[in-house]
Amino acid sequence: MADLRVAAAAASLLAVTVALAGCGSSDEKSGTESSTAAVSGSDASGSVAPTSAGAATGVRSSVTLDGKPVEGSFSTTCAKKDGTLTLTLNDPEHATYGDLTVTAVLTAADDAVQSFSVAGTTGGTGPGPYTLGYTVGMPIGSAQGQNDGIKYKVTGQAVATDRSAPAASIPFDVIFSCDSVAGA
């Protein structure tokens, strides 16, 4: 089981590294969209929930982990370089996960998912970080990508790693709303 945790942690680190490398140079057009472009109504507690990127087009970025929606003020970054598409959602002040980043790396030609990761500075069991990862070739997990215009949907199963709990396969469903793609 320890080998699986190490593999999942390595997959998460690889996905974040590839995501950062895939963002391109500073002279490229930014592909960042803010998820706080509009505000939806308030819930019963009176708190206001921000909408996701793409609100003007009706398509919103969203994250569902283990069947539960993860609400957040996500910024969405979509970048294409050398046949690789890197999609990232980030909420640096997430209430549960701290600095939360969700990243998918796809082959641009066919939307095949090469890696997927969720990394939060908090939210793991105890005071530790939260990590969830998948990469091609792992013995556990799977991921599928689908493009529909400005929306990329990535679904599958990834391995959650936590030092104080056994590794577990967690289902995920993420929509990245890309109003623009840098480098496209």
Image: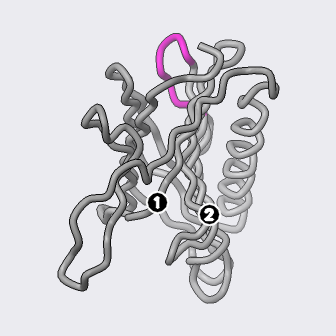
Left or right: 160, with 152 as reference point: right
Q: Residue furthest front?
A: 38
Q: Quadrant of the N terminus?
A: bottom right
Q: Secondary structure at mark 1?
A: loop
The residue under the point 44% across, 49% down is 35
Q: Is residue 16 above or below residue 120?
A: above
Q: Tell me the magenta residue range.
A: 108-114
The amino acid type, in three-letter code, at marker 1 is Ser
Of the pair 48 and 167, the residue shown nearer to us: 48
Q: Residue at x 41, y 36 (%)?
A: 177
- Percent position of residue 155, x then y: 38, 41
Q: Is residue 20 above or below residue 64?
A: above
Measured from the top left, where is residue 93 in percent x and y? 58, 70
**Left or right of 97 in this view: 151:** left
Q: Which residue is mark 1?
A: 73
- Specify the quadrant of the image occupied by residue 164: bottom right
Quarter holding the C terminus? top right
